[in-house]
Image (cartoon, grey):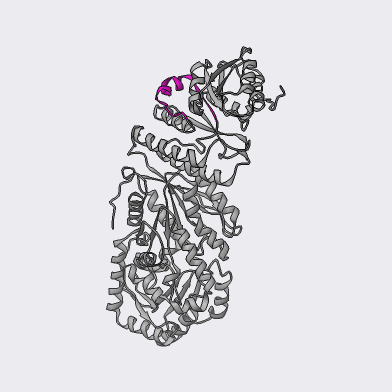
Amino acid sequence: MSHTYTSDTDASHAGRADTRSVVVPVYDEPPATWSSLVESLLAAGWDEVVVAVDRPDAEAARAASQFDRVDETTISMSAERRGKGGAIRDGLAVADGDVVGYVDADGAVDPNSLARLYRAVESGEAAVAVGSRDADAADRDGQALHRRVLGGGYRRLARRVTGVDVTDFQCGAKAFRREVWETVGDAVVEDGFAFDTELLARAHYAGYEVTERPIDWRDPGDSDVSVARDVPGFVRSLVRLDRELPAEPTDADEPVSLALVTDHPPNYGHLAEYGEALARAYAGRDDVELTVFARQVDDDVPGDAADGDRAYDVERVWERDSAAGAWRLLRSLRAGGYDAVQFNVHMTYFGSSNAYRFLGLSLPALARLRLDCPVVTTLHDMLEVVEDERVAEDVSAIEKLGARAATQVALSADATTVTAESYREAVEERYVADGVVHVPHGTFARADGGVPRAEPPLRILQFGFLGPTKDVETTVEAFREVRAEHPDAELVIAGDSHPDYPGYREDLQERFGDEPGVRFTGYVDDDELDDVWHDASLVVMPYRTCTGVSGVFQLAKSYGKPVVAFDNDGMRTSTVETGGTASFVPPEDAEALADRLLDLWAERDRLDEMARTNAEAGDDVPMTETTERMLAAFVEHTDLPGERVEVVTGE
């Protein structure tokens, strides 16, 4: 017979302390295929090959009889169909190697790949080694898409039921120490294709370490597995195992390994500051071990500064407007083996074009399909909260449809938290989603200085990234009237251009930078934040529209500052409906804005009362409370065990 495979890794067993046995279960495969595999295994150095043949025809019986005369082969033949599991069980019963295992007879796995598994066991790295077609560096050639999808679904179910951390239960290549089979073999009762799953589950619960190795796999053609016949059997087997396997004790002292996908400084914009505040609050808990998956640093932005106080890791693996970046993110999340994943996103988070924005909002759903852990999305904005006339002006019907479709996809995570109660109501009215929880935005940590009384001179602060939705023009026009009555008044415009509108701040500064009393600061670093906010008498938010909870308003609450804002539905949802107070004026009305600023400065007691109200609202839901409620959402709406985190569920 001709050899189909060659091996340059284990040409002989010289120098090996352990002997190797491998079982080849044969049923209905062409004799030329499995005979060639057996010869290749012998040539590659296996000490024993057990050929377990079920219901052989005359040609198969003749082929088996030839190996019956070879010292290194053992034949286990049955006139009845034992099933894959039954044949392997009988083969293992007669195998006498120190390290035993099995490989499918169809030739999909060659001896080189199988040898990787045996070496992992022989080296003492693990008691059981599993071949994987899906692990990194694996080479899978062929297999129909529907079988890959079914395999992925089965793998997720099997991991949840058995607790075995592998990516491929059903690959027909396994190796393990003889003592593993001697320990668990009597308990393994599956005769069919679920044999692999039960073997791994029993070994895992017996305390044996299981490792995984990538293999080269070539689809041999038609599979023996029938979707109609065998898939229900797989499910029944998992149900039985779920009932029979002992409850694995959970170490309540072991922190939850949480991956947080968010932007993070030194990048700015797109919730970077919120992401950092959220990460710090998570990292301050004893029951969470956090890794942040952040956007890559742009070439013109300095890298992460050394921060010895930061109690979490930052992995920079994704980038805006990049399908490859999205794929890298999913691969990194999968490789990390996290207990839970949280996506902190808004509509324009992952791209400047609609296609990449849709891809970004699809990532939580894709992660849920690819990961064996709960996935929660935190949505910061929704198209539905923008004023109708603004949507009609700026967004086409197709874009609105696409945004709503993207939102529906984002809601496909195991659970979703939203930052405003009105968002939760909009989801319930317009979308199909379970586990939608209102978790307030949370206020940021601030320097402790109380809420001082506003003293002259009047300093008006407009803070945040600058773009077309921020009406700086009206603010400057109103400030001219204010300064006419208070010549020492100041207008501080703090913030740089919005990432989607590069150069916007520079254009504004060229137009208004020479106005008396007007000062542009550019981007405000963390170490300058306290000074900028403490010096402000009040904050103006002249937003034409706001689609998400305003981080600037949360900062005003954090620092206890009064707020004057344009009066539109989006702004009320984004500000006072999250707690706190603001004084509203008609949008784009410079005279009304100037009058309100002058009135408040004249009524200093009213201004101070607004400051105290916002400070008290900031104390109600600090970021530590936000993380508490988010973890409660994980526990209540996913399968994250409640004993792993110390939270009180419910608002």
Closer to the camera, 414 or 95? 95
Q: Indicate yes or no whether the magenta region holds residue 609.
A: no
Quarter of the figure that contains the N terminus: top right
Outermost residue toward the right in this view: 2
Residue at image x 54%, y 72%? 505
Residue 544 percent location from the top left of the image:
46, 77
Residue 126 seen: no
| Residue 141 image-quadrant placement | top right
Compared with 591, 17 (above or below) is above
Q: Residue at x 35, y 62 (%)?
A: 440
Q: Name the image quarter holding residue 67.
A: top right
**What is the number of callouts on the image?**
0
In this rendering, is residue 165 above or below 445? Answer: above
Residue closest to the eye, 283 or 257: 257
Residue 346 x, y percent position in the rendering = 47, 63
The picture places residue 145, in percent across and down from the top left corner, at 58, 46
Q: Identify which residue, 588 or 367, lies in the foreground.
A: 367
Residue at horizontal 45%, vertical 83%? 588
x then y, percent, for residue 582 = 34, 75
User: Could you tell whether 643 is left or right of 204 in the image?
Assistant: left
- Residue 257 visible in rendering: yes
The answer to whether 192 is drawn above or below residue 533 in the figure is above
Quadrant, the C terminus: bottom left
Q: Is residue 642 left or right of residue 110?
A: left
Residue stretch in magenta:
172-191
